Image (spheres, coloured by chain):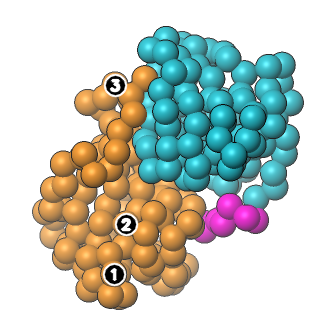
Chain colours: A cyan, B orange
């Protein structure tokens, strides 16, 4: 059994084309022996965004703090603290933060895609 | 893409031997087309507990509200709001709430075990 606090997880900038002001932490993942899926946490700073992209695996999100926009084939939807979100495999998506406080969300994926 | 609020999810009592005052919701799971894992949320009332049991799949928890005890082979550990927890496959475990407010936690499992 392993218990982890987010503040103890190393925070690294996300370095991909199309990213602005986004940081990644991995509270529970491969390194912890997670067998099926990994829990990552992304922080998107005010004015920041993740890349618009798609991949052959799903995202399951839980919004820990703040609010933002999730842009997908369904258009732009507001996401906010306490929302659970399923982004389907191969669905193009992008998280944007137009607010003035950080958007912090869990993003759980199959462990191979950690 | 699907966005779900916990308060909109049906809440059912957990009816298993060894359970007291525990309720289950499934914000994202099989019914939503979740491909790999399901997100359940358990509420354990003050004085309540889940059964002491083990199973061949892991639990990944995130504590949403309150605090409690997670009893495993490592003894009893305190869990509290904001903790991420990995319970390994086949590890005996039990969640207890000795506090005077509800313990609410996400419990993510491979979808076959939803």
Marks 2 and 3, the one that precedes in the sequence: 3
Q: Which mark is residue B33?
A: 3
Q: Are marks 1 and 3 in contact (CB under 8 Å)?
A: no
The image shows residue A53, relative to residue B112, as above or below, that is above
Separation of disc 1 and disc 3 at Cα?
33 Å
Where is residue A53 shown, x and y percent of the image? 66, 16
Give the crowd class for mark 3: few <14, some 14-19, many >=20 residues within 10 Å.
some
Badge 2 vs badge 3, beta-carbon distance below 8 Å: no
Where is residue A113 shown, x and y percent of the image? 66, 29
Q: Please tell me whether mark 2 sits on a helix, a strand or a loop.
A: strand
**Left or right of B43, for residue A101:** right
Q: Are the residues flagged by discs 1 and 2 in contact, CB closer than 8 Å?
A: no
Q: Position of residue A48 (x, y in %)?
A: 75, 34
Mark 3, secondary structure of its residue: loop
Choose between A70 and B13: the one closer to the eye: A70
**Would residue A64 be found to the left or right of residue A40 on screen?**
left
Residue at the spot x=51%, y=75% of the render?
A: B80
User: The residue marked by circle 1 belongs to what chain?
Assistant: B
Give the number of the mark in front: 2 or 3: 2
Residue at 71 percent of width and 28 percent of height: A50
* Rendered image quadrant of residue B45: bottom left
Residue B36 shown in magenta = no
Q: Which residues are magenta?
A: A2-8
Q: Chain of mark 3?
A: B
Label 1 sits on residue: B101
Mark 2, residue position: B104
Q: Outermost residue toward the front? A: A100
Q: Is residue B26 visible?
A: yes
> What's the residue at 81%, 30% (across, down)?
A20
Residue B87 visible in image: no
């Amino acid at each position: 059994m392993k218990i982890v606090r987010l503040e103890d997880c190393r925070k690294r900038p996300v370095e991909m084309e199309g990213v602005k002001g986004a940081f990644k932490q991995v509270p529970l993942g491969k390194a912890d022996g997670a067998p099926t899926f990994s829990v990552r946490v992304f922080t998107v700073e005010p004015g920041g965004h993740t890349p618009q992209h798609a991949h052959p695996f799903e995202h399951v999100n839980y919004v820990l703090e703040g609010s933002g926009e999730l842009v997908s084939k369904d258009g732009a939807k507001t996401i906010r603290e306490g929302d659970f979100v399923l982004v389907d495999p191969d669905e193009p998506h992008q998280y944007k933060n137009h607010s003035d406080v950080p958007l912090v969300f869990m993003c759980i994926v199959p462990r191979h895609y950690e």
